[in-house]
Image (spheres, grey):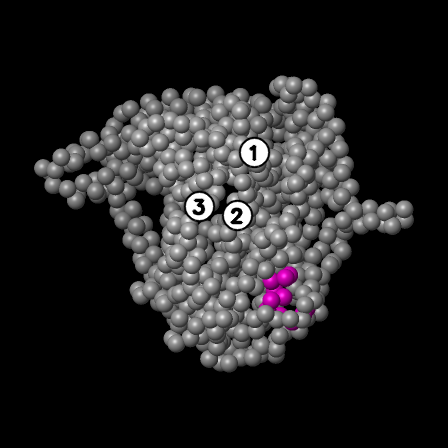
Amino acid sequence: MQKFIQFMKSRKGIIVLITLVFGILCFAFANNISEGGEKDSLEQKKQLLSSIGLMIEKQHYHPKKIDDNFSKQVLKEFLEGLDNEKNIFILSDIEVFKKYENYIDDEMHGGDIKVVPAITTVYERRILELEKVYQNILSSAFNFDSSDVYITDYKTLNYAKNEEERNDRWRKKLKYLTLERYVDLLTNRDKLKQTDTAYKNNEQLEEQARKMVLSIMNRTFEKIKISFTQDKLFNTYVNVITNYIDPHTDYFPPIEKRAFDENMSGRFYGIGAQLQEQEGVIKIASVMAGYPAWRSGEIEQNDVIVKVAQGNGEPIDITGYDVTDAVKLIRGNKGTEVRLTIKKQNGTIKVVSLIRDEIIQDESYARSAVINDNGKKVGYIYLPDFYADFERPDGARCSEDVAKEIMKLKVENVEGIVFDLRSNGGGSLYEVVQMVGLFIKTGPVVQVKDKAGKISVLKDDNPLVLYDGPLAVMVNGFSASASEIFAAAIQDYKRGIIIGTNTSTYGKGTVQRNIPLGKVLDYQTGRTEFGAIKLTFQKFYRINGGSTQLKGVVPDIVMPDTYEYLEFREKDNSNSLPWDEIPKADYAVDSNSNELNFIISSENKMISENNNLNIIHNNALWLANNTKKPISLNFDNYKIFQKQIKSTVAQTTTLSKLSKEMDVTVTSADKSKYFSNVDKAKGDRYQAWLKNIKNDMYISTTADMIVNMANKKIVYNY
């Protein structure tokens, strides 16, 4: 009994207790619901929101006080999220909504649900109004000789004072969208002769441009009416609340929780088909060999999915759906039936019954290639995220997969490795520790601090080193979380060089855990009735004591790209947790750090003198400064500005690609996967990936650095 009490006082015990309490709470509530009418639905939302509120207040790493000020900020962010362009609501709507600005904290403490139903009613009415507004505006020709401007920096706008002002904003938006297409049509017409049957005059092209915009608007508003149900708006509302606490505390409704798990594990249960959205319909882009859609023999590329039904359930028309929403309906539990109403290319309609099976997303796993650079072989490993399937003993683990790729490269006798973590958003903390262990003997990898101030050091205890040669880790501003831990550890140990295309990585230094809500629906996957909340429990720190929060990892070498001046990193979010530091861990820097520092200094000097990279940097700054400015809707002024934009982008694109492709091959072990894959579409995608590598200037430059490191013959003491 004493051991049980001690366990329940521990961090793991507290998490188990939280899960149990909230699971019982939601389970008890669910069993009190009868048939699930509107009243019951509001009661369910009330219980869910108060449960989340309690969890946030009691267990979040750095909770905010849920009071009237909290309410005001959440209401403001919720409305801005619904209407970020400030062209749906008008000022009188906002004034009406203000009566709820001190009520959201009451809802989170058990009050009746009032905010979302009230806002939804107004939102739906405004959407119906705006359908008529845009249709009316697009029924008449635009005058492109005026001095109108379109403001794209919506943060500078206030809500429209009345419907007339709001409608005028729509007029300018639609005029801008039409002008874009009109100029493109004129450019294409310049390639024709006046005698060609396809030739159209200016008035005809302007009308064609308006019809194109009308089609886009019709699809957009249809998607809004399909997607923005009161339940979805409520889920959005809950996420605004959780994200106000910090950007990475999220609420996952059941379907979204399933999608999150699938992304982490690289496995899901579906039909084995790639989908794409074209002009408002969902089409089959390709069929994966060996999986249910392929085995049926009834589904082909370019078939249109009209409806989706769960077994004998009522079919749902998915016209106007996004691919992500369609996928959520088509995926499900293993062995269950999904019925697709398919429109064939010849116009015939048929219903195809498929039994969901496990689909392994091996294209999202680690992969490698060999770069032949100046007579030396350089290994290249790409890792899209730090995936881990802990639900299965044989589940995919990125650390194990990277180890396999290293072994393949060692067989090819590579003299160094480029490890590409660009745009890797993170994943499993455990996998990071295992992966760093592939490159060092033993030692701490990352430090973790909980809300009570307790610091834990996660270490690599395996003295075996799989790879001890030259190493370069590529990162960018989208490299986050686990990617930053890996890069920071390699940097702190001076085990390799960190090469970035931004001055810092993303800056996510917080740790989350999923806490299920409600009764269990699927014991195999652990999915529950009300999904889960992903709650921030801890912060992690480098072994040098500094947090990666906000500041991210500053690369040893920076090669500029187009994203540096865009506001997307943790430091650009006002709700982010602050940076701090703790004492450093006990670790030893490699004795060759001076040689590595010399290489870094030399490479930085070369980068600073690289004219192409300096132009890319200046272009990125120019684009960031100019794309926020109001856009002239005068034809002549617009053409001049667009010419500047296009020439700047084209110059950057040209400079970012190599004038001559690199010599890149695959390992002997992977040749069949690339060049004789039974799934031809998959094989084609692998080859396309290989071609992208061959033209990537950043990979080429990094490979050159690896060759430089190899020539220095630095011996690592790991």
Front-most of residues 238 and 624: 238
Q: Is residue 231 above or below residue 277?
A: above
Labels 3 and 2 touching (C-beta < 8 A): no
Residue that label 2 marks: 360
- How far is disc 1 from disc 2 in space, using C-alphas? 17 Å
Residue in the image at 77% along x and 50% along y: 11
Vertical arrangement, residue 284 with respect to residue 690, above or below: above
| Residue that badge 3 annotates | 289
Q: Judge by depth and name the residue closer to the eye, 146 or 480.
A: 480
- The residue type indicated by label 1 comes to Thr
Against 87, is 3 above or below? below
Please tell me the numbered disc located at residue 594: none
Mark positioned earlier in the residue sequence (1 or 2): 1
Q: Amino acid at mark 2?
A: Ile
- The magenta-colored residue range is 433-443
Instruction: Depth check: give the residue in front, 574 or 680.
Output: 680
x and y percent of residue 495 in the render?
58, 71
Q: Secondary structure at mark 3?
A: loop
Crowd tier of the residue under label 2, counting other residues whose Cα lies within 10 Å: few below 14, some 14–19, many 20 or above: some
Q: Residue at x 63, y 66 (%)?
A: 437
Please tell me in which quadrant of the rendered image residue 154 appears: top left
> Residue 618: x, y in percent?
38, 59
Residue 326 visible (yes or no): yes
The Cα atoms of the two marked residues, 3 and 2, are separated by: 12 Å
To which quarter of the image does residue 489 belong?
Answer: bottom right
Please report the residue visible at 55 percent of the width from the left and 70 percent of the height from the top: 496
Q: Is residue 442 shown in magenta? A: yes
Labels 1 and 3: the sequence-earlier one: 3
The residue at the far right in this view is: 2
Q: Earlier in the sequence, mark 3 or mark 2?
A: 3
Crowding at mark 3 (Cα within 10 Å: few <14, some 14-19, many 20+):
some
Tell me, for residue 336, which label it has, or none. Answer: 1
